[in-house]
Amino acid sequence: MENRAVNKIGALLVLLFLQLYAGKCEAFEVNPLEKTYDVRILSSKSVIKGRYYRPEPDMGKPLLVLIHGATYGRWMWDVPGYSWVDFFVARLGYPVLAVDRLGYGASSHPNGSILTPRCQVQSLKQVLVKIKQKDGQRRIIVIGHSMGGLLGNMIAGETRLLDGLITIGWVHGEKETQIGPPFSEILKNSYVTWTDAEREAAFYNADDADRKIVAHDNSRSYPMPRGSTFSFFSPDRFVLSQIDIPVLLAAGEKDALWTDIDLEAESGLFKKTRVATYVQKNAGHTCMFHQSYRSLLNTIGNWLEENF
């Protein structure tokens, strides 16, 4: 026990030295590991694939579980120049798990019509239970973008698996229903492809976005499981009042998916916890791919430091 304490103090001194004298030098080595989680949905076996980024040395910080929204995948959290892995793992020393939700990327692709928010939540709960069984002492914070925020709300309101929650671009105000593929396209197939123009109109504020990152985003996008359309009914609203862990709500000031961004009103839906809010200036729905993205990362980093 005494040796462990000495080692931890030594690691802290090394980190302090690096921060003081290394300028922008990364303080932690990052070791990425591929992860596979077996899950069962409607009596069928599926797998969720993820990438675990382990910082060395391990400072015992909470695990950040990153959950993407519609048309994205785990790739979105590690884009050169906009990388959350570089910021949270290499610079701040948080372990990070980024997953492909069912229907996306390397994970299983069952019929897209069954991949409703409820189905996605059930699969992600199984992943989190497996993480708890392996490393039950480490705290877990879910960071969800868009529909990933909806799923994070449902997990936090229905279980005791999480210690903190951050949602980005998910609120319960009035939606701009004309954004995205028309209903006729949604009816055609169980996976729905968004055109580049539809994605750009929905996810970006052109005045604060680099055209190269928009093009990169479109080149990496995935079709959306048709079951995702049930997110329109905001099934998480019924459990928000049960969430009792620290919450941070973030949104882009120019998010085209919502007619109004009122995070103060949104925070009032959480009855049992303290809620912090942040509106990212000039950013659209996909906040992390706008030129003001560092303000979002810094806000999240400060919130994590204050609460954990």
Image (cartoon, rainbow, N blue to C red):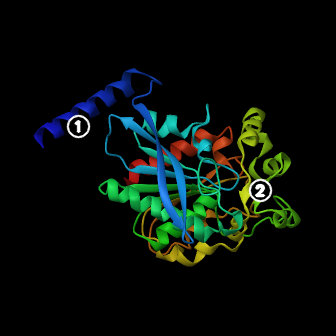
What element does badge 1 sit on? Answer: helix
Hey, which quadrant is residue 57 in on the image?
A: top left
Mark on residue 8? 1
CA distance for labels 2 and 1? 46 Å
Farthest residue in the bottom direction? Answer: 238
Residue at image coords 81%, 66%: 177
Q: Nearer the viewer, residue 251 or 187?
A: 187
What element does badge 2 sit on? Answer: loop
Relative to 281, residue 7 above or below: above
Residue 153 image offset from top left, x and y in percent: 54, 66
Can residue 202 be seen in the rendering of this structure?
yes
Mark on residue 256? 2
* Image side of residue 34 versus residue 60, left or right: right
- Badge 1: few (under 14), some or many (20 or more) residues near its Cα, within 10 Å? some
Can residue 163 be seen in the rendering of this structure?
no
Residue at image coords 41%, 43%: 94
Mark on residue 240? none
Residue 185 image offset from top left, x and y in percent: 86, 62
Residue type, numbered disc 1: Lys
Quadrant of the image containing the N terminus: top left
Relative to 90, residue 203 above or below: below
First reached walking from the N terminus: tag 2 or tag 1: 1
Farthest residue in the front direction? Answer: 44
Dots 2, 1 in contact, CB < 8 A: no
- Badge 2: few (under 14), some or many (20 or more) residues near its Cα, within 10 Å? many
